[in-house]
Image: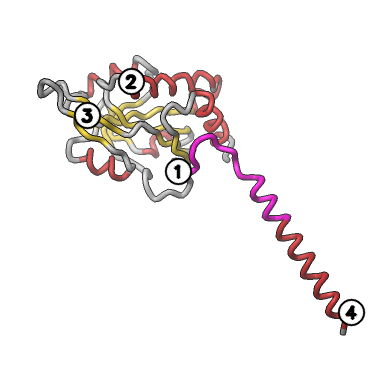
Amino acid sequence: MNKRLWLKTLAGTATLALTGGLLTACSSDKPAFRGVDITGADYAKDFALTDAHGKVRTIKDFAGKVVIVFFGYTQCPDVCPTSLQELAETKRLLGADGDKLQGVFVTVDPERDTAELLAAYMTNFDPSFVALRPTPEQLPEVTKAFKIYYKMVPGQTPTSYTMDHSAGSYMYDASGHVRLYNRYASGASALADDVRLLLQGK
């Protein structure tokens, strides 16, 4: 009887050890992203917005590429140009893999950001970046779907207003699934590291 109890105890210990080893192995395989891992999030899933050339775009249009989506506006004095320049630098750091990174800019100021202005604005950073222009009706819907804050701040004249808005960005893997939230000014090096991991299928 004692021998039988001892064998059961030994078998249980072995099972626990094996399970613990498997759990340790799984946790060690988790990629060390620099951004905030939001894999499986039920927001920021997709969009269907017109680009600067009149074509409706969705996340599926960029299959095979890592996509970074950022919301802003062309008259933004600091956050937007800084973020887009950071994105352009990220692409440069990726070297030969730079073509596998797609920047997507969504304006929160469609009243002033015409298609022509958005197209010209993108060329200041990288001609491959895509600018999207929601209609006034689409803007509340898409910002809600992406948990983006925006608010008009009146200026001295009706057209000199500014826009307060969220400054972070979303990163999608090559299959079009949202994976990371990048805080403002994360740095091109950190973004490039995460892009490489996603391109490796992490």
Q: Name the residue rendered at 37%, 18% in the picture.
A: 127
Q: Name the residue rendered at 35%, 14% in the picture.
A: 124
Q: Name the residue rendered at 39%, 24% in the picture.
A: 83
Side of 189 relative to 59 (left or right) = right
Q: Amino acid at mark 3?
A: Asp
Q: Name the residue rendered at 54%, 34% in the picture.
A: 34
Disc 1 and disc 3 in contact, CB within 8 angstroms:
no
Query: Quick one: SS at disc 1?
Result: loop
The residue lying toward the viewer, choosing from 66 and 164, is 164
Name above or below for residue 70 compared with residue 7: above
Side of 88 relative to 122 (left or right) = right
Q: Residues within 10 Å of mark 3 (few under 14, many from 20)?
A: many
Q: Earlier in the sequence, mark 1 or mark 3?
A: 3
In the rendered structure, does residue 26 fall within the stretch colored magenta?
yes
Q: Earlier in the sequence, mark 4 or mark 1?
A: 4
Which residue in the protein does label 2 denote? 78
Residue 196: x and y, percent? Answer: 56, 31
